[in-house]
């Protein structure tokens, strides 16, 4: 089995510019207010793998003439993502993110909501300051899609009635829209003739990313227990593996799933049981095939893009997304 590309290798063509993004992020959100400074200091440690700035900068470098605005836009994009993470954690009452306390756990849900708003507003204010209406239009479109996606998710009262069509609509809005915006504005900062291809690539990358992320909940083991984490099931979230498995379940299996969703805090044994049912009923294989289809379609989008280190890195990003372990 081929080894999945390492993210550090994928970032290699844009390493120097990517290393400037964190400083840009904290320049944008810096404020002379103790509570904001405390939140920002904690968020510095929560900074993720910088996938969105990475693909943005790679898209800007497809023709070898990147616009230096890409670094600033990478910071803005990551801040928008971080704002959505802070809000999601507060809505879900999640105590941890990447092994660290969330803003809502460390401070309060009220502080988390305001902190997320602050990140959004500072990011968008800096975007306005760039003075490019098209860049603003693309990023605001993604921000709007993300907000509507979250509202639609909250409006789903019966989790087990959540359909595959509902799932794709949610993934498009909450995950794919921002990755599409990142690659589109990246192209606008160095390779504008490939803007449409990059927007489409970002969408498909986002769809593959979310499917792979949802698969991890059923396949990746917790370090202490060696069992699948089941965090989504604990929070009564219905994702593609469960959706695909439901029609193939026996009545007894369906009742066990319904029992899990019927209690506020499912026991670990019940979660492990449902994970096993989803495996048995083909939900994992179905979801993996769908993710691979999105990745294959995204790679096909790049066929018309001239060969370069940046293009090769975007192809490798697809492999990284599908094969990552966390």
Image (spheres, rainbow, N blue to C red):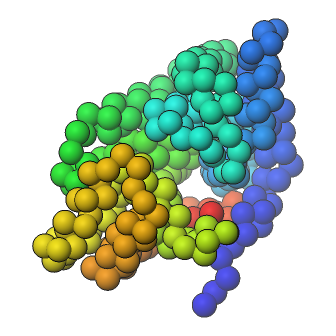
Residue located at (68% from left, 40% from top): 101
Where residue 162 appears, as percent x and y from the top left, is 23, 51
- Looking at the image, is 98 positioned above or below residue 25? below
| Displayed quadrant of residue 311 | bottom right
Residue at x-position 75% and y-position 58%:
11
Q: Nearer the viewer, residue 6 or 214?
A: 214
Residue 112: give x, y in percent of width and height: 59, 24
**271 lies left or right of 125:** left
Residue 215 visible in rendering: no
- Extreme-left residue of the structure: 251
Q: Could you say which is closer to the camera, residue 73 or residue 273? A: 273
- Number of numbered discs: 0
* Residue 187 drawn above or below residue 128: below
Residue 2 visible in rendering: yes
Q: Position of residue 125 (x, y in %)?
A: 63, 15
- Considering every residue shown, the one lying at the far bottom of the view is 1
Q: What residue is shown at x 43% (from left), y 42% (from top)?
A: 174
Q: Residue at horizontal 52%, vertical 70%?
A: 228
Q: In the rendered view, tell whether residue 126 sits above or below residue 45.
A: above
Image vertical order of residue 111 relative to residue 240, above or below: above
Question: In which quadrant of the rendered image does the N terminus lie?
Answer: bottom right
- Most extreme residue toward the top, as rendered? 32
Q: Is 223 on the left-hand or right-hand side of 297? A: right
Q: Which of the image's four quarters has the C terminus? A: bottom right
Q: Position of residue 220 (x, y in %)?
A: 56, 71
């Amino acid at each position: 089995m081929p080894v999945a590309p390492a993210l550090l290798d994928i970032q290699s063509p844009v390493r120097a510019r990517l290393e400037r993004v964190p400083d840009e992020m904290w320049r944008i959100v810096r404020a002379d207010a103790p509570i904001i400074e405390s939140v920002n200091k904690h968020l510095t440690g929560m900074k993720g793998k910088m996938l969105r700035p990475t693909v943005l900068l790679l898209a800007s470098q497809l023709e070898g003439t990147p616009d230096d605005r890409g670094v600033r836009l990478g910071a803005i994009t990551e801040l928008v993502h971080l704002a959505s993470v802070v809000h999601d954690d507060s809505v879900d009452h999640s105590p941890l993110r990447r092994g660290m306390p969330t803003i809502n756990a460390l401070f309060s849900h009220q502080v988390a909501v305001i902190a997320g708003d602050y990140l959004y507003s500072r990011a968008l204010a800096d975007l306005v300051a760039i003075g490019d209406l098209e860049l603003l239009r693309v990023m605001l479109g993604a921000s709007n899609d993300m907000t509507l996606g979250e509202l639609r998710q909250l409006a789903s009262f019966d989790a087990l009635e959540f359909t595959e069509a509902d799932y794709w609509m949610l993934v498009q809005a909450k995950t794919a829209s921002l990755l599409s915006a990142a690659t589109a504005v990246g192209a606008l900062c160095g390779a504008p003739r490939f803007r449409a291809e990059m927007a489409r690539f970002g969408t498909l990358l986002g769809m593959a990313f979310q499917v792979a992320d949802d698969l991890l909940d059923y396949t990746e083991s917790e370090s202490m227990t060696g069992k699948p984490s089941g965090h989504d099931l604990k929070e009564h979230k219905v994702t593609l593996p469960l959706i695909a498995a439901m029609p193939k379940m026996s009545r007894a299996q369906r009742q066990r799933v319904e029992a899990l969703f019927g209690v506020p805090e499912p026991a670990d044994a019940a979660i492990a049981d449902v994970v096993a049912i989803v495996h048995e009923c083909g939900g994992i294989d179905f979801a993996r095939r769908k993710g691979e289809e999105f990745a294959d379609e995204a790679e096909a989008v790049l066929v018309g893009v001239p060969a370069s280190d940046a293009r090769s890195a975007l192809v490798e990003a697809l492999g990284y997304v599908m094969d990552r372990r966390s």
